[in-house]
Image: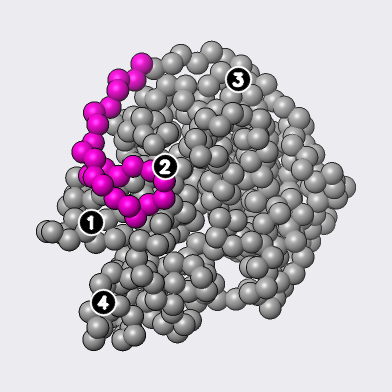
């Protein structure tokens, strides 16, 4: 581990006071921890725990999560690819729990924006808490990271999500549309020091100042999209005051907000320090890499935008989805796609498709190939999939890994035609069984390369 700059040590002592030595010693150790969170729509935390020999203590603030005493090779577990769980730093899980706690105070028509969402840990946590009329927009401005975000949300299976690749200021086109905005903003990454020694070498007071200014710009750009009285959940994975409490002060005074008491879901103060405006987790105090979270309520007025009704799409009949979703033809760059949308969210989603760069919305049900409808992997992974629509084939672990590598399979005892392939009771995707071989329909972009 590289030696810490004096300015970082002084900053850490200013935030953590008498407990700073615990934090610095833990950062110096380099011993990180691993935690996973179950997808309650696909598997219970208890059932997931039974599949890991190294399962350890529960994560205190997340009912679906627990620590692992050793880190397995997750990419070789088909359950991960089926969206049964998500690997996430336990400290970061706390932010998702704050959003879920807030969501409980709203009616069913809740609208949430996760502004800097990649790779998707917090988005998957929030999606699991949405009611049937709620909508989560998960955004990532960097294209390559937006693709990873989209893949993770497809595997999670929620249909009440839209994935966008837009600049924060673009959301102003929607007017004051969101009840909650989660801004887990890019930061100087002091919470990565234990995992990534290079982060220590890249740290400097000048970089901290640049990050703080960028964070203010991001929040200011998205501010018009938050409704008056709506909530901003502001978080970083860093420790210094400039990027945390200092920015909360700026947001309140310059944009119009009131800082609210930190959400204490633990009643266990030994796991964090309470700063002027938020809660600060850190190694040495928490079994995690560290996270700051603060809560603000918007007090400034928010002018609504007049949104014109969207043109209807051509409807298609499709019984591959559960009730409550409608299918429509969509023209894409690669051809014609049939997509399924929750009926109650159609208008909202179409307006976003008109005004933002949308990468994913609803469920990709089938691609139109001549006279054939080819089922899409999104459908199999979706919580809206009608599993009775196709015959299924149960795969062994070796077959499941073969499938995830996009290799062809032999399923001589299965019926011919399109089949759902499953592992441990969960769908992984589709194949087209020809008898002598089964053509693999798993996306090449997601191919397991091990």
Q: CA distance from mark 3 to mark 1?
A: 42 Å
**Residue lying at 41% horizontally and 46% vertically, measured from the top left:** 323
Q: Position of residue 243 (x, y in %)?
A: 62, 38
Q: Main secondary structure of the magenta part?
A: loop
| Residue at mark 4 | 416
**Residue lying at 77% horizontally and 54% vertically, measured from the top left:** 60
Q: Earlier in the sequence, mark 1 or mark 2?
A: 2
The reply to whether the C-beta atoms of the residues labelled 1 and 4 are less than 8 Å apart is no
| Residue at mark 3 | 229
Q: Earlier in the sequence, mark 4 or mark 3?
A: 3
**Residue lying at 41% horizontally and 57% vertically, measured from the top left:** 386
Q: CA distance from mark 1 to mark 4?
A: 19 Å
Q: How many marks?
A: 4
Mark 1 or mark 2, whichever is nearer to me: 2
| Residue neighbourhood size for the residue with mark 4, other residues' Cα within 10 Å, grouped as few (<14), some (14–19), many (≥20) | some
| Residue neighbourhood size for the residue with mark 2, other residues' Cα within 10 Å, grouped as few (<14), some (14–19), many (≥20) | few
Label 3, secondary structure: give it: strand
Q: CA distance from mark 3 to mark 2?
A: 31 Å
Q: Nearer the viewer, residue 287 or 149?
A: 149
Highlighted magenta segment, given as a residue range: 306-329
Q: Is residue 160 left or right of residue 378?
A: right
Residue 324, which numbered label?
A: 2
Q: CA distance from mark 4 to mark 3?
A: 56 Å
Q: CA distance from mark 1 to mark 2?
A: 21 Å
The reply to whether the C-beta atoms of the residues labelled 3 and 2 are less than 8 Å apart is no
| Residue at mark 1 | 367
Tell me if residue 344 is in the magenta stretch. no
Q: Is residue 63 left or right of residue 221?
A: right
Can residue 175 be seen? yes
């Amino acid at each position: 581990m590289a030696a810490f700059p004096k300015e970082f040590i002084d900053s850490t002592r200013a935030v953590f006071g008498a407990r700073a030595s615990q934090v610095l010693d833990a950062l110096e150790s380099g011993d990180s921890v691993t935690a996973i969170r179950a997808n309650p729509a696909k598997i219970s935390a208890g059932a997931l725990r039974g599949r890991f020999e190294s399962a350890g203590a529960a994560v205190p603030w997340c009912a679906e999560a627990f620590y692992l005493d050793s880190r397995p090779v997750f990419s070789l577990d088909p359950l991960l690819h089926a969206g049964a769980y998500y690997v996430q730093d336990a400290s970061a899980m706390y932010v998702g729990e704050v959003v879920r706690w807030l969501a409980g105070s709203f009616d069913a028509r809740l609208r949430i924006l996760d502004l800097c969402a990649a790779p998707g840990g917090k988005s998957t946590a929030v999606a699991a808490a949405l009611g049937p009329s709620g909508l989560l927009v998960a955004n990532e401005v960097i294209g390559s990271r937006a693709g990873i975000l989209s893949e993770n949300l497809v595997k999670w299976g929620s249909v009440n999500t839209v994935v966008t690749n837009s600049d924060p200021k673009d959301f102003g086109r929607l007017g004051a549309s969101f009840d909650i905005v989660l801004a887990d903003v890019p930061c100087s990454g002091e919470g990565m020091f234990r995992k990534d020694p290079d982060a220590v070498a890249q740290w400097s007071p000048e970089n901290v100042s640049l990050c703080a200014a960028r964070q203010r710009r991001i929040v200011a750009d998205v501010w018009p999209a938050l409704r008056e009285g709506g909530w901003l959940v502001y978080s970083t994975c860093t420790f210094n005051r400039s990027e945390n409490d200092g920015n909360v002060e700026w947001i309140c005074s310059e944009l119009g907000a009131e800082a609210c008491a930190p959400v204490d879901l633990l009643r266990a103060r030994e796991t964090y320090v309470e700063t002027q405006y938020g809660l600060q987790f850190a190694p040495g105090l928490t079994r995690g890499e560290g996270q700051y979270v603060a809560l603000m309520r918007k007090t400034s007025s928010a002018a609504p935008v007049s949104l014109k009704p969207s043109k209807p799409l051509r409807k298609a009949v499709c019984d591959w989805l559960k009730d409550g979703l409608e299918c429509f033809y969509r023209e894409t760059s690669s051809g014609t796609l049939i997509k399924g949308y929750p009926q109650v969210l159609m208008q909202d989603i179409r307006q976003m498709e008109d005004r933002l760069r949308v990468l994913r919305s609803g469920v990709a049900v089938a691609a139109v190939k001549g006279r054939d409808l080819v089922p899409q992997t999104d459908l199999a992974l979706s919580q809206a999939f009608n599993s009775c629509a196709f015959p299924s084939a149960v795969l062994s672990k070796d077959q499941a890994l073969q499938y995830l590598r996009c290799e062809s399979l032999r399923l001589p005892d299965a019926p011919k035609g399109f089949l759902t392939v499953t592992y441990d009771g969960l769908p992984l995707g589709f194949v087209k069984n020809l008898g002598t071989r089964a053509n693999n329909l798993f996306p090449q972009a997601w191919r397991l390369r091990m």
